[in-house]
Image: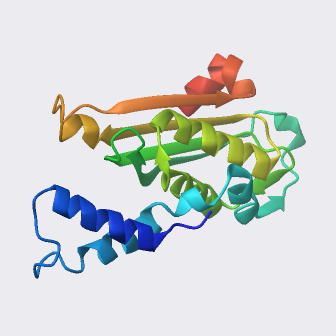
Amino acid sequence: MAIDTEAIKEHIRGILVALGDDPDREGLKDTPARVAKMYEEVFEGMNYTNHEIAMMFNKTFSENLDENAGDNDMVLVKDIEIFSHCEHHMALMYDMKVSVAYIPKGKVIGLSKIARIADMVGKRLQLQERIGSDIAEIIQEATGSEDVAVIIEGTHSCMSARGIKKGAATTKTFTFRGRFNDDKVLQMRVL
């Protein structure tokens, strides 16, 4: 599904009118086009399914990991900075830090691909909980490993800038798949 920038321009113009402003005044006349261009960028992930994202970023490398280590080798990438937009208010979720861990099954994914996956998943109208689930699903598909953990901490402007206005409140979510679900030692290693 492609983002319809012409429809966005039309609707943003209507919002400006509904707010009581003049969309033809100097400061606003190009705003609908600027917002449409911004939405194309910040909602890019809406153009792709989780499977399509996994296919875009599935560059893996076969690795003969130390056979004496068993299944205890783990890859952990911490503090990947992303942003997203809450699907309830279209409000910005910001200062988000994503940590992704997985246990390799004979191959590893390029580290930058993990960050790219997190970034692309964030570029959707989302819930923080779904961001973790989507990243886990994509990492599972791209790496062939069922054992994935995703931890996200972020601030939601729907809480900090409106409503209850609690600017210091952060939300932390945990998504555990495979062995991370049941193995408390693995969970503690990630945390």
Q: Residue 139: x and y, percent? A: 70, 47
Picture residue at 59% right of the left edge, 30% below the top: 175
The image shows residue 171, relative to residue 73, as above or below, that is above
- Foreground residue among 64 and 47: 47
The mark total stands at: 0
Q: Position of residue 81 (x, y in %)?
A: 42, 54
* 173 sits to left or right of 1: left
Pinpoint residue 109: horizontal percent, then vertical percent: 73, 57
Horizontal side, residue 19 vs residue 2: left or right:
left
Question: Compared to 169, does 76 lie above or below?
Answer: below
**Closer to us: 131 or 16:** 16
- Is 113 on the left-hand or right-hand side of 78? right
**x and y percentages locating residue 169 in the rendered image:** 25, 31
Front residue of 85/60: it is 85
Write down the quadrant of residue 13 in the picture. bottom left
The residue lying at 53 percent from left, 42 percent from top is 131
Q: Is residue 174 above or below residue 20?
A: above
- Going 60% across and 56% down the picture, which residue do you hit? 117
Question: Quadrant of the image for the N terminus?
Answer: bottom right
Colouring:
rainbow
Determine whether 168 is above or below 19 in the image: above
